Image: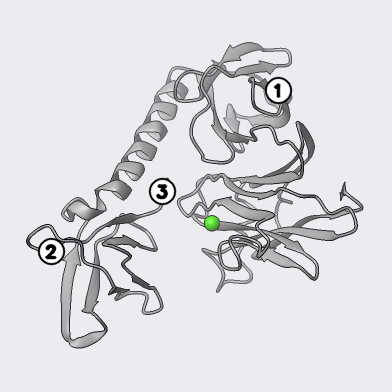
Amino acid sequence: MGKPCGELKGLHNSFLFNIGIIRQQFFNSLSRTDLGNYPSQGNPCSPFVCALSLGGNMKRLLVLIFALGLAAGLSGQSDDRAEDLRIQRRLMALKMEGLIPMRFANGVDGTPISGGKAAIEGIGVFETDREGIIAFPEQEDGFFTLEFSKEGFVTTEIGFEIKLNNLSANRFSISPELVQGFRVVLDWGEKPEDLDLHVEKQGAYHISFWNSRTAADGSAFLDRDDRQSYGPETITVEQLDRAAVYDIYVTDYTNLRRPDSRALSQSGAAVRIYQGSRLAEAFTVPPNRPGTIWRVCRITGGRVER
Ligand SMILES: [Ca+2]
């Protein structure tokens, strides 16, 4: 979801494979079609120029200009973006009605959780609709806790702050239950667009979008990368090695070249660590600090260290 992709076909509907796709704005973003399917990178909402090289022969280079909605092959990504905008408009409409909306999503695939129960201390119990949304009346400023439950998901306690009827983050990702191991889920706000979650098992593997997406032995993997705000971005470690040390951190890819940026600190980022069928720990990014890396925590001896 949210990952731009599409198909390249020849005039007679034949699949075109082994074609290099080069985004002109990002010379390093080269991908190759696999049986006609191609992945793409970057912000899908801006028109872009891309070059296609046939079988690596640059003399037969074709240059195409894609604009959003004009290239049929890109309709998948525009659908995702349109859906996101539609949800944002719906949340805005609820706020105009004097309500405070919240969204709940599956931490592994980002889909909405419908029929979930959100019990908010002192306010009431609400059931998520088919878009995973609840809405409750405006409140005085303060700190609140809610307990989210649904069969098949880890019952999760979430603390949040309401300030001038706004939430620092209104989207929460909930982990499906695990049999063993642990799962790390990152949520954040609208800005920056691309945060990256990392889990590094010392001396063994480093899982993130930019490192390995799957450990060599298959015991840990990136379930989901998000590059269009909000998350979730999720890493599952299927086997918890109690003798190992795991470092968990978040980087701000959008502002990688601006080390003094405060965007990560202001992103409302939250990391939840689930073990088995329980929420082990929850962390929120420290406010008002410059930097593009947030060292969240370490897991040693099978326990999360704060
Ligand atoms: Ca990301």
Q: Secondary structure at mark 1?
A: strand
* Residue 5 versus residue 187 in the image, above or below: below
Q: Which residue is at the far top?
A: 124
Residue at (26, 68) in percent of width and height: 17
Q: Nearer the viewer, residue 136 or 213?
A: 213
Amino acid beneath label 3? Gly
The extreme bottom residue here reads 59
Q: Going from the N terminus, do you reach mark 3 or mark 1 first?
A: 3
Mark 3: give few (<14), some (14-19) or many (20+) Cα within 10 Å: some
Q: Which residue has dot 1 on it?
A: 146
Q: Single out the mark in the foreground, 3 or 2.
A: 2
Check the picture and name the quadrant holding the N terminus: top left
Asked if residue 266 is positioned above or below residue 19 in the image, the reply reads above
Return the x and y of residue 213 as percentages of the image width and height. 58, 61
Estimate the spatial distance between the alpha carbons at disc 3 and disc 1, rounded to whole Å.
Answer: 28 Å
Question: Crowding near pointer 2: few (<14 within 10 Å), some, many (20+)?
Answer: few
Q: Look at the numbered disc 2 and give the secondary structure of its residue.
A: loop
